[in-house]
Each structure stands twice: as structure tokens, then as C-alpha cells.
Amino acid sequence: MADEVIQNKEWKPKASLGWITTAVMCATFVDVLNTSIANVALKTIAGSFSISDDESLWIVTMFLIACSVLLPATDWCCRVFGRKQFFMGCLATFCISAIVCGCASNFEVMLIGRIFQGLGGGCLIPLSQAILLESYPKEEQGKAMGIFSIGVTIAPIIGPILGGWLTTNYCWNYVFLISVPFCIAAFIMVGLFIENPPYLKIVGWHKMDYVGFMLLVIWISTFQIMVDNGQKNGWFDSAYICKLGITALIAFIAFIWWELKTKEPLLNLRIFKNWNYTFGTTVLTTLFGIAYGTIAILPQFLQIIMGYTSYLSGLAAGPMGIGSFLGVWFSTLFNKIMDLKYQIVIGLLTFAVGCFMFSNLNLSIEFNNVMIPNIIIGTGMTIVIIAATTATYSAVAKHEMTNASSLQNLIKNVGCAIGTSSVGVLVSRYGQIHQTYLIDRLTMLNSAFADKVTILTNQFMQLGHDSITAMHMAQGVIYRELMVQSNLCAFMSSYKIYMIVMLFSIPLALALRKVN
């Protein structure tokens, strides 16, 4: 046993780290890209298939559900087929499904393609992360996670920009077909440069935790449908959403109970006994939830309030990628002078500063006012991802890496779903609150309001309208301005909430133990 442990510690892949990194990052990039690239094309796709906008949302929902469903079975599948073979199988499934989606003749074929695309893509991120962490020596794992963080940060930003450009200048089919070259390149490189480590034995078909898998499918499916449809159905004012929520909660509790009880669980939850893994995963889940919230809320602000097109609003989020490269540079510098948990604190504070800057926007902003906070948020996010991921896996054994990565990515997916859905909730709720506050001041007892109504009424009367019509038109102009201001205040309040959540995450980072 001792010889085997030594062999596992000394194992190094035969291929160069550069080729291994390129192979897995190509797979990671194309998977994360597909979480957002199709969003801007949904209206066009809906028109092409003669379906409603609500029905077109299933194209995104089914992909996200499928991504999360197979993810926990990653470790089991690796032991059945071999990790390299399973990785290549996932890439092939993803590629073929992308072609099916791009060539779909009807909505039903599109949905089937997206389901299989999600099944193939869901395991790519944990596999890539596990391979990087195992391939790089311990002292260079921060570097590996820096490269990984760039991929997972830039891809969801590029997605809407690329999707909007392809849909506008060509057609929506290319939104899916653009993934094919990346998949082929990744498939070839994985076949050439990735190998199965000696401590991950291929055992063939063996007993699977079918009960746990079914509970997981029920939980993830009902939860994802709930968060995707909650806002338009009034959340828990809707019986439909309540049923989904109750079902998801019961399935989640049953899943946790079963996984802790069974001898051969689908996911080994006992890994949460690892102190750094637990707190690191909590920090990363919070970060990704807020990050996806900011990525979703900014285009809405720019389109609804500032009148940007979907393409321009996507470009405005692009500078976050510049922040990612800065974050990698700062992380390299910080590694020489401070502990990982203090790096996480700096990253969280930097992210909070970016949110604070966004919370002070107004209707007279220029592009720089959007670009600089985005760079700051991207920098802080990357610093946290690199440091928290390194600390999280610092005490995880190599043979547990695939299970640990699968579990963490499943939890992060839940956090991202909550963060994205929070945008609609915060903007809607705060919009109503600020509208109520502002309306209280719009009475004829308010001299400023009365003077404004009088001025506008006189202007409309000069255009030939009678006094009553002119007054109604004047009040309409003021009401439209009220709606714009209340929506602006709602977006500002949402960013303040994101800032507060980042600040409250600092104690979680400080609870991490020092990595030797």
C-alpha cells in the first residue's frame, strides 16, 4: 500500500503541460460558452419555429438541467469507461448534438439536441478541472487554476457578444455550429495528450447508486424549472411554482439522507469533512452566484435604461475579460507574499468595489463608467477563483479529485441558477419599492411637481391641445420619467445587495486553514 501511495504522488503525465492545458481548456471554453451564447438568439429561434418566447426558454432550461444531471455521475462513469475515454465520449456527444441543434428542422429536434448537448457538456468542466489539478505539481496549481479561471470567466462574456453577432449578420444556426470546430480540436488533443492516471482503475460496469441518481434528477430538474419560470409566474404566489419548490426541497433532503446512508453513494458527501473544501466551495458558490447575477443584470440595465442594443450591451461587458488577465497577474504576485485566504479577501473586496461603483450610476454615464467597474469586478473574481480553488483542493487526495470536482461544480451550478434568477427578483421588487417612494412625492401639494406639470401643460397647449388633454399628456411625460428613475434605482439597489453579499463572504474566507 505504501508503494502504491508513493507511486501515485510521483506520477506525472507524459505529455507536456502546455498541450494538456490547451486540450482541457478548449473543452472547458466551448462548454461554458454554450451556457450563454444561445440566449440572445431565442427570439429569432422562436420566430423560426413559430413558437412563443416562453417556449423558446426551454432551449436554455433543458441544456442547464442536462448539464447538472449527469455531472454527479462523472466519477462513476470514469471508472466504468476510463477517464480519457469518457472525456472523448462527452466531446463527441457534445459535437454531434451541436450539429443536430444547428440543423434542427423543428422545435422538438432542437430540444432533443440541447438535452444531449447538456449531457455531453455537463461533465467537461469537472473533468478538465480534475485533470489540471492532477497534472500540475502542487506548487504550480495556482497557475493552473489561473488559466482555468480565465476560461470560465471570459466564455460567458463572449457568449452573448458572439451569439448576437452571428444571429445579426448570419443566422441563428451558427450559434450552435460554431462549437463544432472547438469540439473537434479538443477531441483530437485529448486523444493525443491526455492519459488515465494509474490510481484511477477502469473497473467496468459496476453497481451504481440508482436511487441517489433518480433523486438528484428530480431535485435538479424541478429546481431549475422553478428558478427559470419563477419571475414570470410571480414566484410563490403561483401554485405551479410552489409545487416545484416543494418537490425540489423534498428530493434534495431525500438525496442528502440517502447519500449519507448508502455504502456506495453517487457522490461522496463525506468529503465535506475536509475543512478547506467546505469553506472554499461555499466561497466559490457565492462568488459564481453573484458573478452570474452581475453578468445578467448589466445587459438589462444597458438595454432597458440606456437604450443599448443586445450586441452593444454585450460588448460593454467585454472588459471583464481584461480584468481576468489582471487577476491572474495579481494572483501570481500575491502568491509570493501572502496566504491564500488573504488573497481571497482582497479579491472579494475588489469585487465589492466594482459593485459599489455600479450602484452609483446615473443616466449620464459614458462607456468608461461601465468599462472600469467591469475590469475591477473581473479582476476580483479571478483572484478569488484562483486562490479559493487552490485552497479548496489543497487537502484533497488525487484519487478523490474527480468526485470533489463533480460535487463542487454541481453546487456552483445551483449557485449560478440562483444568482441569475435573482436579477429578475431584485429589479422587479426594488422597482416597485422605489416607484412607491417616488409617487408619494408626485402630488399637487409638492410645488416642484406642480410647477413642472404647469410648464409641460403650457407647452402642450402651445402645440394646439386643449387644457385637459395637455395636462394628461404632461402627467404622462412625468410618469414615464418616474418609471425610468425607479428602474434605475432598482438596478442601483441590486448592485448594493451584491456588494453586501461579497462583504459578508469575507469571514468564510478567513475561516480557511493555511495551505502548507
Image (tube, rainbow, N blue to C red):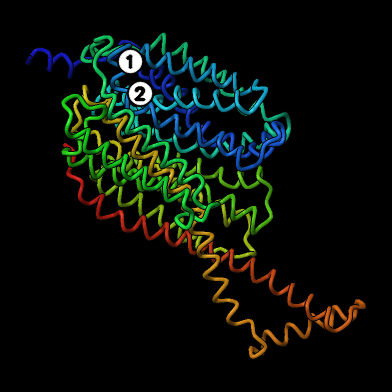
Find out whether the residues at labels 2 and 1 contact each other: C-beta distance under 8 Å: yes
Mark 1 is on which residue type?
Arg
- Marks 2 and 1, the one that precedes in the sequence: 1
The residue labelled by disc 1 is 83
Image-based side of 161 in relation to 241, left or right: right
Residue at (54%, 67%) from the top-left corner? 432
The image quadrant that residue 107 belongs to is top right
Check the picture and name the quadrant holding the N terminus: top left
As rendered, which of 442 and 282 lies closer to the eye?
442
Residue at (29%, 13%) from the top-left corner? 80
For the residue labelled by badge 2, is the local secondary structure a helix, a strand or a loop?
helix
The residue labelled by disc 2 is 127
As rendered, which of 66 and 319 lies closer to the eye?
66
Report how far apart the C-alphas of labels 2 and 1 lie in the structure. Answer: 8 Å
Is residue 482 at least partly visible in the picture? Answer: yes
Q: What number is the disc on residue 330?
A: none
The image quadrant that residue 410 belongs to is top left
Residue furthest to the right: 464
Q: Residues within 10 Å of mark 1 (few under 14, many from 20)?
A: many
Check the picture and name the quadrant holding the C terminus: top left
